[in-house]
Structures are given as structure tokens and as C-alpha cells.
Image (cartoon, coloured by chain):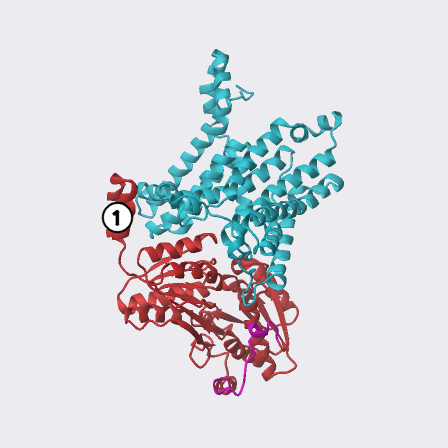
Amino acid sequence: MSVQKKKFTGAKAVLGTAVFAALMTGTALAEPALIYDAAGKNDKSFNEMAWNGAEAYAKETGESYRDFEIQTDAQREQALRRFAQQGSSPIVVPGFTWAEPLTVVAQEFPDTHFAIIDSVVDLPNVRSVLFKEQEGSYLVGALAAMKSESGTIGYVTAFDFPLLQAFGCGYVQGAKAVNPDIEVLQNFIGTDFGAFNDINTAGEVGRSQLERGADVIYAAAGAAGEGALQAAVDAGKYGIGVDSNQNYLFPGNMLTSMVKRVDVAVQNAFNDELNGNWSSGVQTLGLAEGGVGAAMDEYNAELVTDEMMAKIEELSAKINSGEIQVHDYRSDNSCPVS
Amino acid sequence: MSARQPLPNWVTIVLMPALNVLLAFIIGGLAVAMIGENPLDAMWALFYGAFGTGMGWGFTLHYATNFIFTGLAVAVAYHAGMFNIGGEGQAYVAGLGAIVVALWLDQTHWTLVLLGSTAAAMVMGALWAIIPGWLQAKRGSHVVITTIMFNFIASAFMGYMLVQVITAPGANAETRTIAEPGRLPLMSDWFDAFQYSPLNITFFFGILALIFTYVLIWRTKLGYKIRTLGANPEAARYAGISAVAVIIIAMAISGALAGLMAVNEAVGVQKRLVVGYVAGVGFVGIAVAFMGRSHPVGIALAALLFGALYQGGQELAFELPAVPSELVLIIQALVILFTGAMGEMFHPVLERIFAKKIEAAPEEATTSTGEA
């Protein structure tokens, strides 16, 4: 980076096109790049998970990478193009909103590799990574239903769109599998992407579910989720985190976290390029592939009994063998249970 | 010295905001220095990013076009004495009209898409603003409260429309993309210099909107009524001006102007409608209008400044990765703080410099006003 800066300062004297040329030569290292989705790098969830993957790559390989936070939608294409022009490869973009801009830019740079998470872009130089969120949510749903004493559990999510419905639908299916009579409260925090950062409203929504009798709350809402988890903890109830392992946030009150290994997807993409193993096409990471799951660690060990653990292992085995087919909301935009 | 001396127009509209912006940049530079980066490097990256290349200019002018629309929207309502902070919601709902017409006509020709979606965006934006206008005029519900509430309603309504009604198959919360024949031409189709920038034909609508607003407010009967109502509602009533009609018309024009943003951003650039596409531009319009003193010339300059901050900020984050993206927000916030809340800070100083000149040489002062 210091090299880059020197080039930059030097270019000031020359002005004009020289600056551009200097920048190009200054950054012609084929560093991989990661561009976060609208919620930004430090959302303690989806984007932060992607960042963790990039960090793990840097730590294990000693290589460097570039990352970037966008502020407006128009900057998506611009950011992709800037990194592609600078020779970055692969360029990884977490989030389905990237599909459209990536389709445009990936065609302009057929020799650059791109990876998108949570959506499919069908181009020869793009890897699309999908997760079976419904399978991981199924497991945490089962855990919630087993832990619940009131017979009511809650699902707090950002806003109404198919991806988040898939989380909720898997959760309900898992809960009903162990307790057919359980009631699952489902509420949205807001109406657009701002909801992913709206911690206060998430807290209000969580509190309202607690007042209606819920004693376990699954919060799938990016950074905002912490608000709902805090509400559950304040009431002495239990919370379930999402995307990254959030068990450490409130030890003793976090039943588990539905981990979605976005970090693995990012790290794999970076590593595959470095080792010359790049492959494009669709990759689907479910329970069997270790792409999703219920996080168990020292922070929730006391909350999960041996009996619960055995049930989870049984359900996992059945999902992996195909005996249990967890319905994906996105396949028909509906959920068989509610 | 107790009463404020009027300053020459060019001082109020150009010099004072320029001094405020300069101050904002100096303090922003101090923040850069505090995180251990060279402030001059950062400012240069910001400036070069916004104006150094054709692409930079293209992005700057594209953002500026959005801000012109939402800024003018605030200004027109402001002249009628109303504070329309619902530009965000009006532009959002206008996006629905614009995209539905664009998707309907996209197999024909882009001229039809442009005209059709422009008309639809203006109508939808106007409708969304007329309701709070009507509530203010007839029921006395304060327009600040109602417009901001309408932003929330717009967000919920549009979220529903985008997820349940006009969603593209397989997409999460956006419409399908406008087909090739219906896409608005980009400036880069005509001028290579603007390559890779989103600047499109709607930019000219921005210029027309500035001229339209000037003519409307200062050269028409309606504009006179609007200004009279804004300056003194009692006098307006005494003069036989119908407050109800003027409020509703002014809000309709305001909403229609905010709605034009949909043509630039959704139809022209994103070529589809996505959840939350306005992304705060409606609110930045408030700052733009205030910084520009609700005058089209001032608004054009303020919109250009904010466009440059948006684009330059992006480039700054690329060039100096150590500078966090929040820093650009800090600079933007400082600009808003110094031009909005503390906009009159330099008034006493400038008064001392210029007011005497006016007394001493009134002729000269009139000339400089004319030049502005």
C-alpha cells in the first residue's frame, strides 16, 4: 500500500492521464477482492462473515487482499469494474443484490474470475455459491422447540423477501418436527434493507414476541438481529443467532447460532484462484457440505442437553441421507407450515 | 448593526456557501490527519475522483442530477412556506410508475420509454405529495409530520409491491430488467469521455427542471402566489390568493420534481426497480435546497458539490483504503452542518465587508447583483 501511495503522490505533479497510468501500474498485483453488500463490513453477521473468510485467507497464506464498502447502488458496477481494471481476481461479492451489476461487468472482463454468494449468475467466469439456509434453520428450529417451555417461539427477520422466508420456513419445519403443537411467531423489522441495521426496532419486535409468550427467539436480520437477541437476554429467555456464530455475544443465553459459512465460501474462492483450482458454476452448500449448521461451543454447552444433542444428530443424519427433505421456500414461494 | 444588512446576491448565493464548504473541508482534513493520513492526499483523491476523469465527471453529474430533482422539490415547497421532507417517499413511489410504464413499453423505442416513464413518475410523485398537501390545506395537519409519515408508508407499500406484485421470477426484491430497445441512451454512447459512467439523457431534464423552476417561481403569476403565500400567508389571503389551491399545486409540483429522480436512477441507470432504490437522495435534497438558498443556481452548485462528494468519496475509499468510508460521511455531514445549521455564521463578517460598500457605492452593488 505504501508503494501505491508513493505513486499517487508523485502523480500529482504530472496530472492528467499520467495519474491514471501510474495508478494502474501501482496496483497491477492480482490481489483478490471482496466487495461488501449494503449493510457494510462490520454487521456482526453476513458481511462480517465474508470479511472473516478473507482475513483467514490472508493469515493462512500470507497473501493480501483488497476490500471495499459501497454506499449507493450505482457504485456496485463501478466498484466491480475498478477492481477488475486493477487486475483483481477473483472478485467476490456477497449478497443477491449483486446479481444484476455482476452480470454486466463479468461479461466485460471474461478473463477475470468472480464469485457471488446467495444468487446465481450464469456466466463462464462466475462462481455462484448458494446455501441451503432452510436445512440449518430446521436444526435450530428443532432446538428451539425442545428448549421452549411455553410452547411459543419467535422468528424476527429484517423484511419480507424470499431468502429470509426460507430461513423462517426451515425454522418452523424443524420446530414442528419435534413438537407439532408449537406456535411460531414471525415478525418483520422493517420494509427495506435499512431493516438490517435497525437494532432498536428489532429490539421492539423481539420484546413484543416475548410478551406474547415466546421464550426462544431466532433473529435473522444481519446487524439488527442483536437488538432482538438483547431483548431475549434481558427477559432471561434465549436467543438464536444467524450467519456467523453469535453464541459468544450473550454466553448462557444464546441457545445456538444458525451458521452460514459465508467465510468458507470466500476463503475457498480466494484459495482456489491462488492454487490454480478455480472453477465456475453453481456450488450449493448445505448441511452435508458443512455450509450451514447449528453452532455448538463452550458458550452454549450448558444449554444444550445430551438428549437435545442426540436429537439434532439424528435429524442431521436424516437430512444428509435425504430421509428428511426440508422444503425450500424459494422453490415455490410458499411454506407448507406456519 | 442590530438589523441585518442585506448582502449582494452573489455573496449570499455563492461566496458564503463557498466559505462554509471550505471550512467543512478544513475540519474534514483535520479528521483525516487524526487517523494518520495526509489530508492533502485525501482531498486530492476526492477532487481527482470527482473531476479528474471523464468517468468521474459522469458519475458526479449523474448524482448531481438526482440531487437537482430532489433539491428543487424541497425548494418549490419551501417557497410556498412548506417544508416537504417527503422527497424520499415521493421519489420511491414515482419509481413504481416509471418502471411499470418502462417495462410495458420496453419493446418499442427508448423515446417512448423516456416520455412515458417521465410522465408516470411525475404523476405518481405528485399524487404522493398531494395527499399531505391536501391534509395541510384542508385539515391543518402539519406537512412536516405527514410527509415524513408518508415516507414510511411509501417504504412499506413499495416493499410489498416489489416482493409480492412486480417481482421478477427468481429475484428477491426487484423487478425484471428493462429490455434492450427500451433502455435510455447513456452519454457514453455519444461521448467516449463518459465511458463507464451512468450519466444519461435524463441529465438534460435536470437542466430543464432548473430553468423551469426559475421561470415558475420568479416569472409567473403562480410563482408570485407561491412566494406571497410563503412570505406572508395573511397578506396572501388579504390579496385574494387561495391558500388551499396554492398549497396543493405547490406540493404537486414538488412531488413531481422529486419523482423525476426515478427516471434518472431507476429507468436510466439501474434499469430495474430495487427495494430502497432512493437510498437517501430525497433527504440529501433537503441539504441541497438549503445550501442553494432554494434558488436554481444555488441548487445546481450544491447538487454538483454533493455529487462530487458522493463520487469523490467513492474514489477516495479506493485510493486510500486506510481512510474509512465513514470519513466521507463526516465530510458530507460537516458540509451540511456548516451550510445548513450554521449557514449564517459568516454573515456578520461579510456584512462588515460588503454592507459598507453598498452604502458607499450603491451603483456598484447593483452591478454585481446583475452579474450574479
Q: Name the foreground residue: A37 vs B7.
A: A37
For mark 1, what is the residue?
A: A22
For the colour red, the matching chain is A
Horizontal and vertical percent for residue B146?
Answer: 67, 46
Q: As drawn, is A307 to the left or to the right of B119?
A: left
Which residues fall within the magenta stretch?
A318-335
Q: Name the foreground residue: A284 vs A302.
A: A284
Horizontal and vertical percent for residue B271?
Answer: 52, 54
Q: As drawn, is A253 to the left or to the right of B105?
A: left
- Chain B visual colour: cyan
Name the residue located 51 percent from the left edge and 49 percent from the top edge. B184
Residue B192: quadrant of the picture: top left
Residue B84 is at least partly visible in this image: no
Residue B300 is at least partly visible in this image: yes
Q: Is residue B307 above or below residue A51?
A: above
Q: Is residue A222 above or below residue B271?
A: below
